[in-house]
């Protein structure tokens, strides 16, 4: 793994111009044709798969990833519970448009004021997706709430009458302090979200080490907010560079897309947009790979022989 300190300056990399695109098709291809998938993904690994979505740095897209992958999993036919473990700054409920339906949180469950199923908020449209918040917004991490409490919670989800969910997604807080340690404790696998900038990569590198120390070996990364125009202009690292630096398998590459911000503000996950947004399709593909424990490659595509190729951020 190349250390974060040996980052190659973008100007020294061989960035190559993009070939002019072919004429766009007149009609939109159906989503399955676009994704080139016409089968249901095969669920790999033992269920429930407990996946923590983490990053180290804040604001890189953890909550966006949790919401969109969670809803994608439900759309693919899998049951998922998303736990918002970002206690003080909870906002997963807002992204999902479920904020008015959170009556109880895990704090009330632990205090014996309600049952676990009362704290689970079922999505309006996708009933196999449920949200669980640890506490009320702006509240502090409840005293004594730590890794053991989250393990208890995961066990309680496993032992529900209706059976365990296929996936438990844990939206991790930023930083590497108590909230982070709590959030990663019950996880068996991790999705590390990073943007292609040096600060985010340094934090991602640090978090990878901490996850490995905690015994989480299955770590895949999502590179978010990728801009091909900036990569071409040598102002942003390519996904290939990011992968070389972190040395992690790639779960997905999400382009910078104004639709993400629009959907955040509307409380309507991007993957439900019709027609699908580019970032939404990328999240769907990432969810597919998560199900199958698959990964993608950032590839350099060779283009017209006399012209130079370009680093494509979508791989096979
Ligand atoms: P985190 O949970 O890591 O703090 P969020 O998921 O809350 O990050 O995202 C932070 C902000 O970045 C949000 O306003 C979100 O809309 C925006 N954002 C995330 N991903 C993208 C993207 N691919 N394109 C554009 N904006 C994005
Ligand atoms: Mg967040």
Image (cartoon, rainbow, N blue to C red):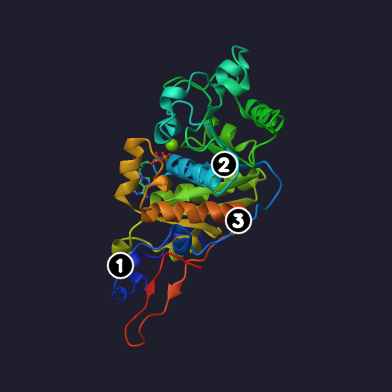
Quadrant of picture, ligand 2 = top left
Label 1 residue SS: loop
Mark 3 lies on residue: 41
Residue 304 visible in the displayed image: yes
Label 2 residue SS: strand
Label 1 near label 3: C-beta < 8 Å?
A: no
Which mark, residue 102?
none
Give percent across and percent down for residue 297: 51, 66
Which mark, residue 26?
1
Foreground of the two, 244 or 149: 149
Specify which label sits upstream in the sequence, 3 or 2.
3
Quadrant position of the N terminus in the picture: bottom right
Give percent across and percent down for residue 115: 62, 18
Label 2 near label 3: C-beta < 8 Å?
A: no
Foreground of the two, 32 or 285: 32
Q: Residue at x 54, y 19 (%)?
A: 142
Foreground of the two, 163 or 124: 124
Give percent across and percent down for residue 298: 47, 66
Foreground of the two, 39 or 46: 39
Query: Where 117 sits versus 170, above or below?
Result: above
Q: Residue at x 60, y 44 (%)?
A: 78
Relative side of 88 to 155, left or right: left
Q: Residue at x 45, y 25 (%)?
A: 88
Mark 2 lies on residue: 52
Q: Residue at x 53, y 51 (%)?
A: 287
Q: Residue 229 lies in what quarter of the image?
A: bottom left
């Amino acid at each position: 793994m190349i250390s974060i300190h040996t980052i190659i300056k973008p100007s020294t990399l061989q960035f190559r111009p993009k070939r002019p695109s072919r004429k766009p098709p007149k009609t939109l291809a159906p989503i399955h044709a676009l994704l080139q998938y016409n089968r249901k993904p095969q669920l790999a690994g033992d269920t429930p798969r407990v996946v923590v979505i983490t990053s180290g740095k804040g604001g890189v897209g953890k909550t966006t990833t949790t919401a969109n992958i969670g809803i994608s999993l439900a759309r693919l036919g899998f049951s998922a519970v998303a736990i918002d473990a970002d206690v003080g700054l909870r906002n997963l409920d807002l992204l999902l448009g479920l904020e008015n339906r959170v009556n109880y949180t895990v704090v009330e469950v632990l205090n014996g004021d309600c049952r676990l199923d009362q704290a689970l908020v079922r999505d309006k449209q996708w009933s196999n997706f449920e949200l669980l918040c640890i506490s009320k917004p702006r509240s502090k991490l409840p005293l004594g709430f730590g890794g053991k409490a989250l393990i208890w919670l995961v066990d309680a989800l496993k032992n529900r009458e209706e059976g365990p969910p296929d996936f438990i997604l844990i939206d991790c807080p930023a930083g590497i302090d108590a909230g982070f340690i709590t959030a990663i404790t019950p996880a068996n696998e991790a999705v590390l979200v990073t943007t292609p900038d040096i600060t985010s990569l340094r934090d991602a590198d640090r978090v990878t080490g901490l996850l490995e120390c905690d015994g989480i070996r299955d770590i895949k990364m999502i590179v978010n907010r990728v801009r091909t125009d900036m990569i071409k202009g040598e102002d942003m690292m390519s996904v290939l560079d990011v992968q070389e630096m972190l040395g992690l398998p790639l779960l997905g590459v999400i382009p910078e897309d104004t639709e993400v911000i629009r959907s955040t503000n509307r409380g309507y996950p991007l993957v439900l947009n019709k027609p699908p947004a580019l970032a939404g399709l990328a999240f769907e593909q990432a969810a597919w790979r998560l199900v199958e424990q698959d990964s993608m490659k950032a590839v350099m595509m060779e283009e017209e022989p006399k012209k130079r190729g370009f680093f494509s951020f979508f791989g096979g």
